[in-house]
Image (spheres, helix red, strand yellow):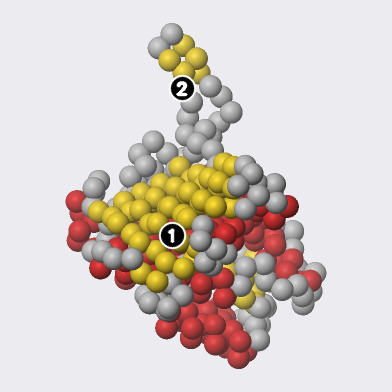
Amino acid sequence: MGEKANVGVIGLGRLGSLYATYLQTRIQHANLVAVSDVREAAAEAFAKENHVPKWFKNYKDLLAEKAVDSVLVVTPTSTHKEVVIEAARQRKAIFCEKPLSLSLDEAVAMSSAIEETGVFFQMGFMRHFDKGYAAAKRKIDEGLIGEPIVFKSSSRDPFRPSLEYLDPRQSGGLITDCGIHDIDLARWYFGEVRSVHSIGGILAYPEISEIGDVDNAIVTLQFESGALGVIDMSRSGIYGYDIRTEILGTKGTLQIGYLRETPLMVLTKDGVTHDAVPYFMERFEQAYIAQLENFAENVTLGRPPSITCADGLAALRISLAATLSLKEARPVAVVAGEG
Ligand SMILES: NC(=O)c1ccc[n+]([C@@H]2O[C@H](COP(=O)([O-])OP(=O)(O)OC[C@H]3O[C@@H](n4cnc5c(N)ncnc54)[C@H](O)[C@@H]3O)[C@@H](O)[C@H]2O)c1
């Protein structure tokens, strides 16, 4: 591998187009050499506007390119299995967005393909690269707050994404699509989860019933250590993109996250106001860039992945157990392999 990874981006939607732009403008250890999207016109327009040498409608044509040594898989979750397995066969270094896939069977097939081919694979969970979440991890590991005993996390979207995106057959549903970030953090900070219990409902957008999902849910967790957790996730946080986590320890508490985007408070006789974080693009820009730089550095320097396929699989197992719990209205054991 040279000094820079030669990267192809597969999927140029909301996140993939951001990633491709970052690769082109912000990532030191990578060149953006090709893009692919089934929306061929979008791929062509992006490539021409951003001086990307090659674009493809079919991702397999991108994978056949010798000039591409690494790929970012940023397609809908329902396609991750197919694209990742094909990329492994073509011996590309792979970065795959969360969630790993839609089912454990798919995830195991992906993991086997990665193991058999020996390709580099890094899972996308950008919160590990967010300054606040990363600092919290260091404080926990240093023992600053003693033993972590309660995990509390909120993920609220400011509005409902498209029904096409939300459809559980594409995204995995609210808990797997959105809550998986919090579930991954829970594992990172607290270790493995023993059992989950979920409740949820269609409380804000009646049309969600058309796709068989919920728009708000709460998952409680019990960790192997005995520690407790609660995650609330919402598609109707109408005031902004609200991502916050609290970790209660025996010697102190950490609060991670913020709601005010601009460092400005407006104080008048009518009250005190400020704006709110608009959406994921603004909230996690620094983390997305750090994550891509880390991927490119790991690939070029021959370092191991910072987040593995096994991490992706473990988080998926918990999210699927929590989704089963929601459907069957009962607690579900995670380690027993249910879900
Ligand atoms: N980490 C995060 O904060 C975050 C945020 C948003 C999305 N995501 C993840 O990123 C992935 C994409 O999400 P999105 O919001 O960008 O979705 P999106 O629907 O906006 O974009 C997906 C793109 O992939 C294209 N596509 C579909 N099938 C394809 C194929 N076979 N080959 C090439 N292109 C194909 C679509 O045309 C579309 O442009 C999902 O897995 C999602 O979970 C992560």
Q: Residue at x 65, y 65 (%)?
A: 32
- Residue 247 at what x, y percent from top left? 55, 47
Give the label on residue 115, or none: none
Split into 4 quadrants, where in the image is the C terminus? bottom left
**Sequence order check: which comes first, mark 1 or mark 2?**
1
Q: Which residue is mark 2?
A: 273
Furthest residue in direction top, as rendered: 269
Helix, strand or loop under label 1: strand
The x and y percentages for residue 4 are 75, 68
Classify mark 2: helix, strand or loop.
strand
Mark 2 surroundings within 10 Å by alpha-carbon count, few (fewer than 14), some (14 through 19), many (20 or more): few
Name the residue tied to disc 1: 221
In the drawing, does residue 327 fall left or right of residue 47? left
Quick check: 158 left or right of 188? left
Q: Residue visible at 45% across and 61% down? A: 222
User: Which-is-in-front pick, marks 1 and 2?
Assistant: 1
Answer with the quadrant where ligand 1 appears in the image. bottom left
The answer for how far apart the CA atoms under marks 1 and 2 are is: 35 Å
Report whether the residue tagged 2 is closer than 8 Å to ligand 1: no
Instruction: State left or right for residue 128 relative to residue 166.
Output: right
Vertical relation: 2 (above or below) 110: above
Kindly identify the amino acid type of the residue bearing the numbered disc 1: Leu
Contact, CB < 8 Å: mark 1 with mark 2?
no
